[in-house]
Image (tube, rainbow, N blue to C red):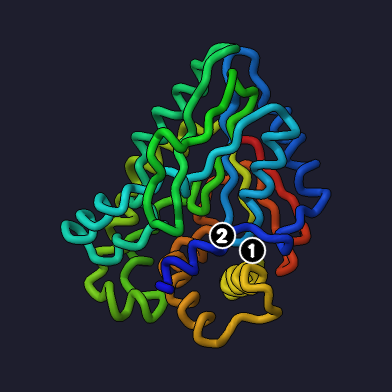
Amino acid sequence: MTLMAWLSGCRKTSTEMIDPRLPEAVGGFLLSKLRRDRPVLIGIAGSQGSGKSTLAAHLAKTYGGVSLSLDDVYLKREERVQMARRVHPLFHTRGVPGTHDLNLLEQVLDALEMAGEHGETALPAFDKLADERLPVSQWPVHAGRPRFIILEGWCLGALPEPPERLAFPVNNLEQEADLERHWREAVNTALSGPYRALHARLDGLVYLRAPEFETVLDWRCEQEAGLLGVSRIPVGRRAALQRFVDHFQRLTVWMMQGGINADLTVDLDRDRRVLAIAAKPPT
């Protein structure tokens, strides 16, 4: 089995239990944004394994909405292959800004906002095992016009890094594969352009902040262990997963340190329990 194949199986498991304080706080935030003229678009950001997908689905079901994932609008595999050839080989791996089809996402958001009572909106879906977007005929369909659109994605709301932060690699992946900084500079450029426009469209953003970056790897390993039905994954798989998570380290740490413009920040401990909830001060 390839690395991408078994990584794709790292789906949400029972380890991602929702702290009861989390949906209560975020639900109150949602209701404070409710509008009569159109659906409210709320983003949920957080590292892999933080529980954002579970939370988004729960909120959509509870408050009459629909949940979307940034993961479901990845560029098709061939598009990423072309990007890897044209820009940088690391863009072959999906995940970082630049590897999403934001035009498709905008079309879906527009369709949901304009949907009538009896309208139907096809929602993109991505097959991580095949590393390919599913054909439109296999996309789930949302009926009617939602009150809320919950969009979850690990890098939602991330701000571009200052140029001086890009000067030095943060891990072995960048040291070995991006010594001339072309990849991380391209990611930063994407954050400054199309991703910034997406963030501006949000009516609000919730950020689930992990206690430290090392916890992100532990969370992903917990997911993999649950999938395999074991208490701990083999050392070799943990090392391979470390290499995959390294693609996300730079932005994950930057967001933890304040490189995100969130309206509500939820600090989690390593067991995903809520430590603190802080709202952005009014301007």
Tell me the quarter of the image containing the N terminus: bottom left
Q: Earlier in the sequence, mark 2 or mark 1?
A: 2
Which amino acid, by three-letter code, is at mark 2? Ser
Tell me the quarter of the image containing the C terminus: top right
Q: Is residue 81 above or below residue 123?
A: below
Question: Residue 29, position in %: x, y?
Answer: 71, 35
The residues tagged by marks 2 and 1 sit, at their Cα atoms, a distance apart of 7 Å
Using a 10 Å C-alpha cutoff, classify the residue at mark 2 as few (fewer than 14 neighbours), some (14 to 19) or many (20 or more): many
Q: Is there any visible trace of residue 72 in the rendered image?
A: yes
183 displayed left or right of 41: left
Question: Residue 222, position in %: x, y?
Answer: 65, 71
Q: Is residue 93 above or below residue 112?
A: below
Which amino acid, by three-letter code, is at mark 1? Ala
Label 2 with label 1: CB-CB less than 8 Å:
yes
**Which residue is nearer to you in this view: 188 or 74?**
74
204 displayed left or right of 165: right
Q: Mark 1 = which residue?
A: 210
Using a 10 Å C-alpha cutoff, classify the residue at mark 1 as few (fewer than 14 neighbours), some (14 to 19) or many (20 or more): many
Which residue of the protein is positioned furthest toward the right in this rendering?
20
Residue at 49%, 24% in the rendered image: 121
Q: Mark 2 = which residue?
A: 47
**Which residue is nearer to you in this view: 53 or 139?**
139
Residue at 64%, 14% in the rendered image: 36
